[in-house]
Amino acid sequence: MKVLVVNAGSSSLKYQLIEMDNESVIAKGNCDRIGIDGHISHKTGDGRTYEGDYNFPTHTEAFEKLVEVLTKSDASVISDMSEISAVGHRIVQGAEIFDKTTLVTDEVIQKIDDLQELAPVHNHPHALALWACKKVMPDNVPQAVVFDTAFHQSIPQKAFMFGLPYEDYEKYSIRKYGFHGTSHRFVSMALAKEMGKDLKDLKIISCHLGNGSSITAINGGKSVDTSMGFTPLDGVVMGTRCGCIDASAVTYLADKHGFSPKETSDYLNKKSGFLGISGVSSDNRELSTAAQEGNKRAILARDMLIYGIKKYIGSYIAAMNGCDAILFTGGIGENATDIRENVLTDMDCFGIEVNKEANKTRGQLVKISTENSKISCWVFPTNEELLIARDTVQLVINN
């Protein structure tokens, strides 16, 4: 059974074709610069590649090229799209409407588009991609949508509400939604299996660290709190996002700069974080190099991230009344060995002991705590696409 997994952005369309019999990636690639000019890069599981510039005015043209590359190019892997049994789509924002993986219908697509005000960068492009996929794929191929926010719908009201008048929640749906839910769900389930434990018996703190980062408290397999909030802006400092900030500082800043609401949002989301603090880069790798060369602002940006992660870990241990495991995933979480070590160092009050030799491993599953550590600590590579494919298969089988 072959499943096509699609992750659409405002100007991109990433994809993977997965053979579910052995969960291997048959092909993967990206159509980018949609609406600008257009480019596709494609690679097969056996090492063949295809790349080219094309005109992609909309997601429909990108999908049409994707179909051609999969079926007719020198790097084709199937002879016809009817060989694909189902399509799974990643959707960022499902609000309180969608709390589980859902089959695609015209009504579902419209509801996803209606939520664009809550995720303007993501949800409208998701809807465009869904319409485009419906146009290109055979009618008998089922499609499913998997929501980043769905995993966090288990967060209790005391944790997801803001201290605003209750009417703002009722009228405008202002609350904590949380993101990276698909990643947090995948790694927590996989970690429980690796530990030989039932997920229902574990308290896990999952640290998804990358250009966007979120920390999630998972109790018994359910998200009970998470660092990202109404949007992915909240939480720890990130590549270009400021993370948590006093709302009064935002209004003060907007007044001083003469910003409109949109300009304020762009400033906090696109010009802050690592980039704004360091003045060097939003990329942790470049920040790390600058820090090693003695750049004080680069050092500060990384210290702020480490301190922020520590605070969330401590607060979530308190919120769950304990913790069995802490895991690191995402580009930074899987590869930045110094950040992991610094986060877990000086946490003696929780009985955490780091195995510094094991922690030198990058991008692989590894336990990085000692046998004496009261909380086991892990690096666990995420695979959101595989979980989307699994969810899609399960939904199709059950329907």
Image (cartoon, rainbow, N blue to C red):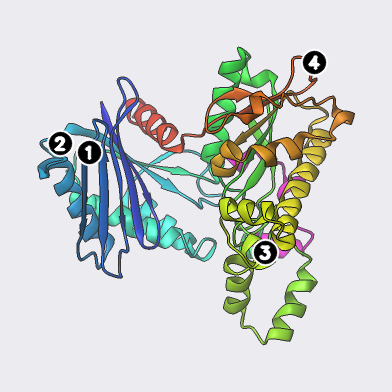
Q: Is residue 285 left or right of residue 242?
A: left
Secondary structure type for disc 3:
helix
Residue on which the image places disc 2? 82
Give the mark nearest the N terminus, 2 or 4.
2
In percent of width and height, residue 197 lies at: 63, 14
Dot 2 falls on a residue whose secondary structure is: helix
Q: Choose the circle earlier in sequence order: 2 or 1.
A: 2
> In the image, what residue type sits under mark 4?
Asn
Question: Which residue carries the number 4 mark?
Answer: 372
Of the residues tagged 1 and 3, which is closer to the observer?
3
Pointer 2 with pointer 1, Cβ within 8 A: yes
Residue most extreme to the bottom = 258
Which amino acid type corresponds to the residue marked 1 in the rendered image?
Val
Q: Helix or strand or loop: what does disc 1 sit on?
A: loop
Q: Which mark is residue 350?
A: none
Which residue is identified by label 3? 278
Residue 141 falls within the magenta-colored stretch: no
User: In this orientation, which residue lies closer to the viewer: 292 or 350?
Assistant: 292
The magenta-colored residue range is 151-170
Residue sitting farthest toward the front:
293
Q: Position of residue 222 (x, y in %)?
A: 64, 32
**Residue drawn at the location 59% of the way across and 52% of the way down:** 284
Q: Position of residue 209 (x, y in %)?
A: 61, 44
Mark 3: which amino acid? Answer: Ser
Q: Which residue is mark 1?
A: 141
For the residues bearing labels 1 and 4, Cβ distance under 8 angstroms: no
